[in-house]
Image: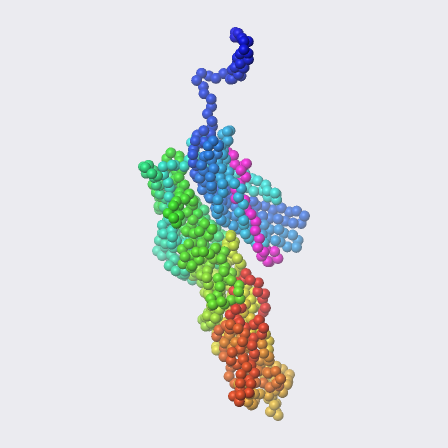
Amino acid sequence: MLTLFTRSGNWVVVWIVLVASACKPTEPAGARPPPDMNSRFLGVSQWVGTYSVRSSSKGERSLEGLTEAWDRTMWSWGIVELEHRAPLRSALGPAPVFHEARFQSTLTTESGSQVERERCSGSGSLAATLEFSATGQYRLSFSDVFAPCEGSITLDGQEIPAGTSVRLTPPAEKLFVSLPTEGLKLSETVTFSTDDETGHSTDWVVQWNLAPRNSEAELLLEAEGYDAWRPLAFVGTLPADELPPVGVTTLGSSLLRAPKEVAPGPQPMRAGATLRLRALVIPIGPFLPKKAARISFVLRSSKVPGVAMNSPLSDGEASPQDIQFEREPNETLGLTFVSKDRVETPAGEYTQAAADLSSFDFGAYGEVTAIAEMADGTLLVAKVRDEGDSFHLLPLRIPKRAPDSFVADVWKRENGAMALADSYDGERLPGGGGDGHAGDGLTLYEEYRGFIADGSWFSTNPETVDYFLYNELEGDAVAGINLFKRATRLQVHAGFNFSSGDFDPTTRVANFNALHDGGRHRVDQHLVMLTRSSQERRRSQTQGGPSTPKHAGVIELAREIPPRELANTVAHELGHSVDIPHHGEGARRDVAWRKQPDGRFLEVPGMDNGPAGDVVTFKQEGTGFGLTLPDSLPAVIVSTAHGGLFSGDETCFMRYASARAVIRSGERSVRYFLLQPEPLGTTLCSDGKGKTFNSDGLYPDGTVRTSRHGDAAPKRGDCVHHVCVNDAHGHPPRNAP
């Protein structure tokens, strides 16, 4: 029994102590308070590892006559390096992020449908936080990041540029999980679903693999021949003994040859180029060399449709993953094949490891990193060397390229394009040619990725204006194609063949395996088809011309063209496919002259089978002297006015040179007959002026000779400054012959 004293109020103090003691539970002898469940984790100063996030949403719903169907996927991944900030219960740090997203939505009503498509990929950085709660849980969360995604809306057959934003990071409140009961490795896969404000449900899969950072070593990642390597795809069916050795791209120039027996459809599953990776464990300072228990290589690859801009012709989405680890070559190196995105060493002791990456696309890109698991449970995530010989905790970009580019630096250097963006389409014709519109409809990335024509792959030059042609006439048209090429200074690629699956003749699009990310596809650029007419056509015609290849892409040459005129005709019609018009319109009459019994001539239309017309007389055009014609004369073409088809610079092949007689103002019944055919044009004019017979002159007797056909019509002629090949510019079709 306890006796209490009240002196000086000490009883109160004693009472409080007694009450407090009475409230405490009775503990066994030797028992200690339970430790903080997070103490071993909060003692880690640095965490490293990797993470990935996948989201997908797919569904269909109907409301008041409107049906919506959508399909959206997103994938991002990166490296995490976090530093504990005492006394906080969290570790903070930057996390590089690489992402790819696709979105498609179709809205259907009774009146039609609207299809919206976006696709994007890119890289950046976000803030990551590793938080430890007091209740034995933790989470890895990220700052909210939304990436822009570019694409288009197709409405009534017309494409309209469009865009959306894609969330790259999951909602943080969904990410709390329980701490492991043993060890310090934090490895989790978290799955959940969310609903957005539009009512779409999204499924999430978030994975991470974190561990304390080893402080006694670094892991370095490098690639052999990295500076000179670019991705390639395999074309054709090369025998095994002709496959490229490891580290070689099989590319000695911009042209890769293969047999011509290349069928439409997906290309064979064989790599076009390989790249040897090497990861090395390097001790820091005075520490002895460290060995890893396992070294893994982890890849993030692009998945661009097809293998080149125009191949395969169909099922481009089914083409192989652009870059991947193949089983056989990596097992040969002693690695375990986990997936096309991951290979690793078996458990053991390693100071280095090597792996082979294989490319299956001429425009492939991606990032790769290496991870070393140390015997003490710590991790090393690879660092890569920059241009200044410093090392950074970043993935290795494949191929070597700028952070905001998917184009290999080696190709940019070879083509003087180091300062150009992947979306660049700003090349111009030499010497100031062209109508002022820059570009050829192909972005820098598309020119780099390249095209396959009749079994050969080639990339194009970003500083030349390119023009794609299918030549059905083969050798017969070569002289005219070269004439067109010299005059326009376009880079003409005439090796395409639809029987080899190079293009679809119903659409003629040359860059249909497009990557829309970051403006890397500007427009569907079209190929021109040069064909022989299937009908007994008297005149050649460029359907829809003059315009750009989108509208003026089918040329039908007349079946019977005099050999002297063939090259000129080919060049003339090709000119219409790059928006070059005639020097003028009309002022042409097809006639025949019928001699009467009294010796006079009547002019009748066409091929001497029309009604009798006016009485006409004849003079020599070059001298003004009178002229007597023979009784029988084939049908002729008469120039009826200045500023028509025959006007302007006489050396230009866009001028008609088929007139054999001229009608002059004030002498409507006189036909000035040309004793010799007019010369055919061999170039493009730089103004609308006549220079010789189309300018005013003098007859031999000193009297004034009027210009034969006159200057070109207003805003005509000056053909070299009409050239435009870029389908991004709206030149309406005009259907000129």
Residue 283 against residue 403 in the figure, above or below? above
Q: Position of residue 365 (x, y in %)?
A: 45, 51
Quarter of the picture containing the C terminus is bottom right
Which contiguous range is marked in magenta?
154-180
In this orientation, does residue 643 appear?
yes
Q: Residue furthest right?
A: 64
Residue 384 against residue 84 in the figure, above or below? below
Q: Position of residue 502 (x, y in %)?
A: 48, 61
Residue 460 against residue 619 in the figure, above or below? above
Q: Residue furthest front?
A: 8
Instruction: Please tell me which residue is depicted at 53% across the width and 57% down the height of the picture.
Output: 522
Q: How is the image coloured?
A: rainbow
Q: How many marks?
A: 0
107 or 226: nearer the viewer: 226
Instruction: Please tell me which residue is depicted at 43% across the width and 60% down the height of the picture.
Output: 458
Q: Position of residue 649 (x, y in %)?
A: 52, 76
389 or 523: nearer the viewer: 389
Residue 332 against residue 732 in the figure, above or below? above
344 or 292: nearer the viewer: 292
Q: Position of residue 289 (x, y in %)?
A: 32, 38
Q: Is residue 157 magenta?
A: yes
Instruction: Please tell me which residue is depicted at 46% across the width and 63% down the height of the picture.
Output: 464
Q: Is residue 570 magenta?
A: no
199 or 453: nearer the viewer: 199
In this orientation, does residue 311 appear?
no
Instruction: Please tell me which residue is depicted at 43% across the width and 45% down the height of the picture.
Output: 395
